[in-house]
């Protein structure tokens, strides 16, 4: 049924196209070009591609220097290294210095699969969310990847993009418009809102909505591609219309999407909510399907949580 | 080679910069005196003799740049920038006060003439590599100067950058190590020794010179040689004295961030 594209290929093709239009764009890699597949950019722009070897911290500070001289650097590595390993470099050299570095962390969460626990970033968004003004997003499909990359090039300031590298369903029409910081409603229902982010969990949330509909529960599904800044208006609107929220993220439930949504809810419109995500655990090795089951990142788990939050909604004391 | 007149002028200028810096730190009552004093001569040679800059256009694209990676020596650089006319000299008395444009560590967004934000040690050389790569792409022939602290050289990232600058053949990077032999907690050979520093940079593929960092003609000659190096990035290891010129502070392990009342500061300036 579904039309799938390899996100890695879409990423590198989009970067190449953006690079053809904007000569400020340069690419930095830390000895993972075979993984990111950015050879096409290097072939066309050998002088605008810098492989710094296995030295991510250096890569990020070099990117900051390139930006200070007017370039628009994309720096690429696995999400775990992009965030845990280069936090201070990204914080000080790039963000604190108010520069324009586009950091890309691939293989987020369980998609690190066979690389295992050491490479499994369940905390990257949480770490990055504490950096003032940083824009953090994770495209959920090939179209949103293209459009959000374009938006991030047009935006002056540092961004962190979580990049799912393997195949993903096409969810959007080619002509769909995207804006950083504005979530997308993929399906509408009045009982509960499933707010998801990223390829893995937007996909599972859509499946969960179908399963819930079979039980007579109608769910709104939102692709919250940007978790910072969070789309406050949309969260408030969902709380007002559905009265129950489930957040779904391929990440720790601490300081990721669920936290961002909860912060809006408690301040603006207290609403029953539950968080689907990794419950304070380290990553492990295994196949993607195994890991999704292991960490509770499946449509079935979302359905269970939706039913739980609906009970809360029904018993909530109306003030 | 500098003629005697130039040397005399630059010697006076260094004294003036030293005085302005002691004055700014003394006016506040505390500051990074030691590491500011040890870079006065190199800053003087860069800004008054070697760098191609335009204080009326601090972001001129093809200017020479300085990344003061040991960002805590900001006060010495602020004295130079004020004297060059990047901003009024009375800003120097706002050092580290709330709302100032002159923070303890260099900030490219706050201070006209500061080329890169620094302060978290170890990152400046990497940033300089980024600037140097950008200039190479754009066909800009300017030089990127970097000053690294000796204690800073404990940071692993310095050596990541050392590899990369050599790999990318960034001969337009001219770096200095302010080798005053003291880090915050004490003497380097007792805390974390970095010897043989010259051999380390040589082994990383750099063009390395070792000089007396308070000797203006030696600094001048080293920069001239570095400018003409066709392939390799340059490291000029400067033997310096932390706190140089302030007799009670010189080579004292307590001079990294020291209290200095204004009266004592003025007396120190009078003795220069």
Image: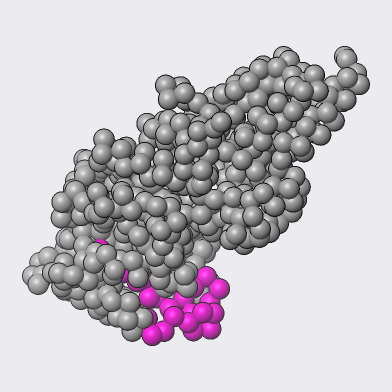
In screen coordinates, is B259 left or right of A10? Answer: right
Q: Is residue B75 above or below residue A24?
A: below
Residue A225 location, quadrant: top right
For residue A50: magenta? Answer: no
User: For this rendering, which residue is in front, A117 or A179?
Assistant: A117
Residue at image position (87%, 14%) is: A319
Q: Is residue A25 above or below residue B231?
A: above
Residue B176 visible in the displayed image:
yes
Q: Is residue A149 above or below residue A103?
A: above
User: For this rendering, which residue is in front, A129 or A307?
Assistant: A307
Magenta stretch bounds: B173-198
In screen coordinates, is B147 left or right of A121? Answer: left
Q: Tell me residue B143's x, y (percent).
A: 21, 58
In screen coordinates, is B6 left or right of B156? Answer: left
In screen coordinates, is B39 left or right of A47? Answer: right
Q: Tell me residue A150's x, y (percent).
A: 39, 32
Q: Tell me residue A45's x, y (percent).
A: 25, 50
For residue B189: magenta? Answer: yes
Residue at image position (48%, 51%) is: A90
User: For this rendering, which residue is in front, B95 or A210?
Assistant: A210
- Count of all numbered marks drawn on residues in the image: 0
Residue A230 location, quadrant: top right
Residue at image position (66%, 58%) is: A286
Position of the C terminus of chain B, as image quadrant, is: bottom left
Position of the N terminus of chain B, as image quadrant, is: bottom left
Residue B45 visible in the displayed image:
no
Q: Tell me residue A183's x, y (percent).
A: 57, 25
């Amino acid at each position: 049924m579904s039309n799938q594209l390899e996100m890695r290929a879409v990423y590198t093709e989009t970067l190449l196209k953006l690079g053809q239009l904007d000569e400020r764009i340069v690419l930095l890699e830390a000895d993972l070009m075979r993984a990111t597949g950015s050879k096409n950019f290097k072939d066309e722009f050998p002088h605008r591609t810098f492989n710094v070897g296995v030295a991510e911290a250096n890569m990020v500070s070099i990117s900051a220097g390139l930006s200070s001289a007017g370039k628009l650097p994309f720096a690429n590595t696995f999400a775990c290294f992009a965030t845990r390993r280069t936090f201070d470099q990204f914080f000080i050299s790039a963000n604190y210095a108010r520069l324009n570095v586009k950091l890309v962390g691939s293989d987020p969460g369980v998609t690190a699969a066979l690389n295992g626990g050491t490479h499994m970033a369940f905390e990257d968004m949480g770490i990055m969310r504490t950096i003032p003004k940083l824009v953090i997003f994770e495209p959920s499909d090939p179209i949103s990847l293209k459009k959000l990359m374009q938006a991030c090039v047009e935006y002056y300031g540092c961004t962190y993009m979580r990049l799912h590298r393997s195949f993903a369903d096409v969810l959007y029409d080619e002509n769909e418009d995207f804006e950083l910081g504005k979530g997308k409603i993929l399906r509408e229902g009045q009982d509960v809102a499933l707010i998801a982010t990223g390829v893995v969990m937007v996909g599972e949330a859509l499946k969960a909505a179908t399963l819930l509909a079979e039980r007579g529960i109608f769910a709104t599904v939102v692709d919250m591609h940007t978790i910072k800044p969070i789309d406050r208006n949309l969260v408030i609107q969902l709380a007002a219309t559905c009265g129950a929220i489930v957040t779904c993220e391929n990440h720790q439930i601490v300081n990721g999407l669920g936290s961002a949504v909860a912060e809006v809810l408690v301040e603006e419109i207290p609403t029953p909510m539950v968080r689907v995500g990794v419950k304070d655990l380290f990553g492990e090795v295994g196949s993607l399907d195994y890991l999704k089951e292991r960490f509770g990142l499946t449509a079935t788990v979302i359905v269970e949580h939706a039913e739980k939050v609906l009970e809360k909604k029904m018993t909530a004391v109306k003030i | 080679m500098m003629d005697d007149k130039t040397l005399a002028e630059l010697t006076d200028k260094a004294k003036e910069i030293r005085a302005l810096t002691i004055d700014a730190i003394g006016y506040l009552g505390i500051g990074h005196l030691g590491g500011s004093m040890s870079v006065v001569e190199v800053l003087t040679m860069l800004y008054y003799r070697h760098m191609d800059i335009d204080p009326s256009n601090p972001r001129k694209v093809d200017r020479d740049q300085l990344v003061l990676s040991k960002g805590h020596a900001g006060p010495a650089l602020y004295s130079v920038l004020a004297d060059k006319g990047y901003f009024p000299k009375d800003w120097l008395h706002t050092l580290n006060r709330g709302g100032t444009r002159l923070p303890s560590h260099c900030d490219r967004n706050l201070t006209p003439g500061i080329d890169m934000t620094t302060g978290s040690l170890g990152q400046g050389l990497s940033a300089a590599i980024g600037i140097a790569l950008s200039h190479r792409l754009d066909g800009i022939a300017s030089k990127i100067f970097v000053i690294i602290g000796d204690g800073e050289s404990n940071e692993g990232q310095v050596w990541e950058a050392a590899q990369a600058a050599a790999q990318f053949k960034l001969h337009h990077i001219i770096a200095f190590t302010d080798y005053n032999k003291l880090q915050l907690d004490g003497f380097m050979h007792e805390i974390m020794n970095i010897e043989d520093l010259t051999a380390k940079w040589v082994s990383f593929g750099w063009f390395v010179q070792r000089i007396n960092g308070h000797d203006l003609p030696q600094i001048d000659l080293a920069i001239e040689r570095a400018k003409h190096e066709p392939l390799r990035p340059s490291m000029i290891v400067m033997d310096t004295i932390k706190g140089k010129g302030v007799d009670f502070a010189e080579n004292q392990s307590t001079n990294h961030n020291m209290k200095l009342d204004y009266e004592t500061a003025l007396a120190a300036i009078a003795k220069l």
